[in-house]
Amino acid sequence: MAPNPQQKKSSGSGSIKRKTNPTQKSDGQVSNFKKPKLSYNPNKSKFNPTHPSKFPKKEYQKPHGENGEVGDSKKQARLRSKELAQARKKIRKKHYTLEQELALLWEKMRCRNISKEDRSRLVSEAVKKMQGKISEIARSHIASRVLQTCVKHCTQDERNAVFTELRPHFISLASNTYAVRLVTKLLDLASKEQLAEFISSLHGHVASLLRQMVGSLVIEHAYCLGNASQKQTLLMELYSPELQLFKDLVTMKQNRLEDIISKLQLQKSSVARHMTSVLQPILEKGILDHSIVHRALLEYLDIADKFSAADVIQPLSGPSFVRIIATKDGSRLGMLCIRHGSAKDRKKIIKGMKGNIEKIASDKFGSMVLVCILSVVDDTKLVSKIIIRELEKNLKELILDQNTRRPFMQLLHPDCSRYFNQDDLASLNLSIPSLKANASLLLYLSYGEPDDEEANEQDKDGDSDGDIQMNEGGKKDPFKRRQELLVDSGLAEKLIETCSEMAEVLLKSKYGREVMYEVAIGGSDGILHPTLDEKLLELYEAIASIAAQPKVEAEEHILEQFHSSRTIRKLVIDCPSFATVLWEKALKGNCAVLAKGHSSKVISAFLETSDSAVKKLAQKELQPLIKSGDLSLPKPNESATDK
């Protein structure tokens, strides 16, 4: 290609430079020569023949104005762009102004230092602005929070107006992520009539909402706030269509599903099939935190066959187990999983609880699940490794609490009515009817009819096959299991050491004194004897040394304090070894002083005990006090040990 005569290469850089204008003077002065315009290059920009800037000035005619006059195109273009911008601004302002105004009011009304009058005024203003649009605002991410604050602080009439406007939209709002908090807030502040109206509006939607993570929160909230009949109404939605049709024939006395089925003469199989279709998706989605689900599962296990019951136990035995044991029905459901689960299921349950043992023990219902594990599971090595070790870490605090002391009391004195009420003891004996009825059948199908030697071998190996354990719980001897968990694991020794270290605190504690009493007497059936007799003697000496301290007016003596005096009195009556140490180290020679006041009950206990050796120790010194009237023995009906 021939070089352009108007261009030349630079010797240094090789770049192409345009030649200087020939009309340019050499002295730097520039002539009036104008550079010609370049022609339009179609490769650089797309040519638009309709655009005014592409026409020559002479040929382009300015557009006419509104009055027919020729106007300035640039001015009109600017005016048109301004008008469009203002129109867009108006549209945007219409769409967003209400939310912005509500946000500004919300920032003022939620301040802590605002007066009640000012907040009430701002709330009323916000409620007026929202009238007619509350259902839309409830679904907004920001405005719904404003509405929640207004519902919390508004008057009852304003709250009723909000409830009335939202009434047709309750079902859709219950499944909305942003509106669910507003719905639960309305339920908390609703009257009895409004709550009943809301629960009636859920008819036909309970099962579908329970399958949603958001909707299930509303159902659970309504279930917890409702009375017994309203709870039963919500549960009937999960049973079967037949039960919903004839629910008026059922009285509140027949609150169990099995009783309802027998009264209405329905088939268990049809009800169980419907409940399976309802509960199976809930189990698959892992929505297991709600008490209504726990109650429904308990009722289902009462009527389910053995295969359906096993299908429920298996998904619950794992990491999700911790989530279900925080409610009354959930803890019972968990205990059924432990009692009827296989060895593998129990292993999964215990391993899933790792790291949460102390939290579970502090819960009223979770602590009973630990009690059930200690009473049923035969794999004592696994239980000691996970449960016992975690309980030992914070032993000083756990034995002082009403709930966390329960596992220790079960090991020291199983199923004692002093430490477990009738409801707790009943929950420990729950079972699934279909699995319990088929226990002997499963045993026969698995092993055939065993002879005596095989039966003995199976009894020794409690965890040989999980299917055999499904119905009767643990097969190991209860005393042997307790000994392995309490003594062989080292827990008993640490308990005695802790009681010796905290003797005064435990004796004066309402719940700690019970642990102290059971440890000091060696547990039921003498489980701590004779292995830990030396350690127990150290504990007796620690208590006696505290009792030997002189009385001080500023502090209440251990023999005068309400809880400690009764506990020591019970120990004197029930434990001769302790009574001997206490007499020799603390009471001998001081009975004349201690016979006055509340401590006289401890002194008189030496004459009430059935041990003749203890009576002989104190009789010589106490007999003169009885004759002089300084010490009086209690009446037979008052001599019973205090609980």
Image (cartoon, rainbow, N blue to C red):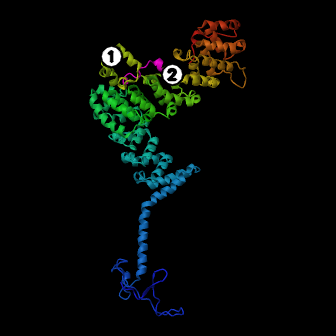
Q: Which residue is mark 2?
A: 411
Query: Is 430 on the left-hand or right-hand side of 605?
Result: left
Q: Nearer the viewer, mark 1 or mark 2?
A: 1
Classed neighbour count for the residue bearing mark 2: other residues with Cα under 10 Å, few (<14), some (14–19), many (≥20): many
Residue 73, percent across and down?
40, 81
The amino acid type of the residue labelled 2 equals Leu
Q: Is residue 525 above or below residue 506?
A: above
In the rendered image, residue 485 lying in the magenta stretch gets the answer yes
**Label 1: element kind:** loop
Quarter assignment of residue 207: top left
User: Where is residue 165 drawn, in percent x and y?
Assistant: 40, 49
Report whether 530 appears left or right of 466. right
Q: Residue placed at 40% from the left, 51% from the top?
A: 135
Which residue appears at 49% of the width and 56% of the height? 103
Residue on which the image places disc 1: 450
Earlier residue among tags 1 and 2: 2
Determine if residue 63 is in view: no
Whether 511 is drawn above or below 38: the answer is: above
Badge 1 crowding class, 10 Å Cα cut-off, few under 14, some 14 to 19, many 20 or more, is few
Would you say residue 585 is visible in this rendering?
yes
Q: Which residues are magenta?
A: 469-487
Name the foreground residue: 284 vs 245. Answer: 284
Whether residue 166 sits left or right of residue 364 in the image: it is: left
Residue under the point 61% across and 6% down: 612
